[in-house]
Image: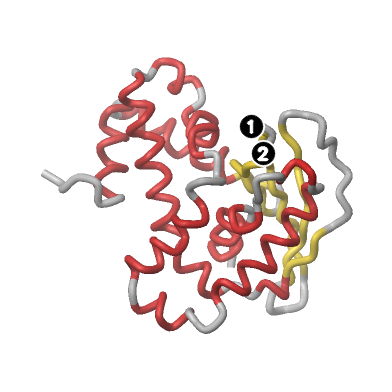
Amino acid sequence: MHRIVIATALICLALALPNNARAASPSEVIQEAVDLLAEGLEGRKEELAADKDALYAFIDGILMPRFDRRFAAGAVLGKHWRKASDEQKERFVEAFYLTLLHRYADGILEFDTNRVEILPYKGDAEKRTTEVKTRVRLDDGSNIPVHYTLVNRDDEWRMFDVKIEGVSYVVNYRKELESEIRSSSLERVIRRLETDAGMITSE
């Protein structure tokens, strides 16, 4: 279930960020995203489930312009981002983004947007980053908190992190990759992600 929630979190904001996104409150952006996600998938779930390339293209078309890939990648790499070359940064941004897209794409097809409740916004929309809190109803009737973190860049809100029950996907990936980088190198990690994402063939 957490995979499904993360999958929806990674694209739901992307569906609803118009050019004047700053004019809407962050919670209104989330609500519109949930509504548009439901509309976009209506009648297409079987088609997309049978065609991975079409599913990836569907998600990429709405996510790429609005998910802050570079900000998220920098947050995940942490101290290693500052040490990376410009080429490594660009490669990591692309490989990490495609890895997320491929890993969580199927979860989009399983998610029921009627389970999402947007909580009253209590953040500060004047700051560079803000958080929108929601909760998602599970099959057993219980609710789990899902919090979206957005960054304001060029007067547009873009998502870069999601926390499920207090656990951040950025922090999780940072820990995972930190361990891998320490045992090998940043270059090897980037090449592994590029291979996993189908950007290069394994040797």
The image quarter in which residue 179 lies = top left
Q: Which residue is mark 1?
A: 153
Q: Which residue is mark 2?
A: 156
The vertical placement of 61 against 200, above or below, is below
Q: Residue at x 69, y 48 (%)?
A: 148
x 65%, y 45%: residue:
19
User: Left or right: 12 with respect to 127?
Assistant: left
Q: Residue at x 63, y 73 (%)?
A: 38
What is the quadrant of residue 105 in the picture?
bottom left
In terms of secondary structure, where does tag 2 sit? Answer: strand
Is 34 left, or right, of 65 in this rendering? right
Separation (CA) of disc 1 from disc 2:
5 Å
Quadrant in which the N terminus appears: bottom right
How crowded pointer 1 is (Cα within 10 Å; few <14, some 14-19, many 20+) is rated as few
Q: Between residues 110 and 35, which one lies in front from this camera angle?
A: 35
Q: Are marks 1 and 2 in contact (CB under 8 Å)?
A: yes
The kind of residue on which mark 2 rests is Glu
Farthest residue, direction front: 19
- Please provide percent x and percent y for residue 129: 72, 33
Tag 1 secondary structure:
strand
Colouring of the image: secondary structure
Residue 178 in picture, x, y percent from top left: 44, 31
> Relative to residue 59, is residue 46 depicted above or below?
below
On the image, the x and y values in percent for residue 161 come to 61, 43
Amino acid, disc 1: Arg
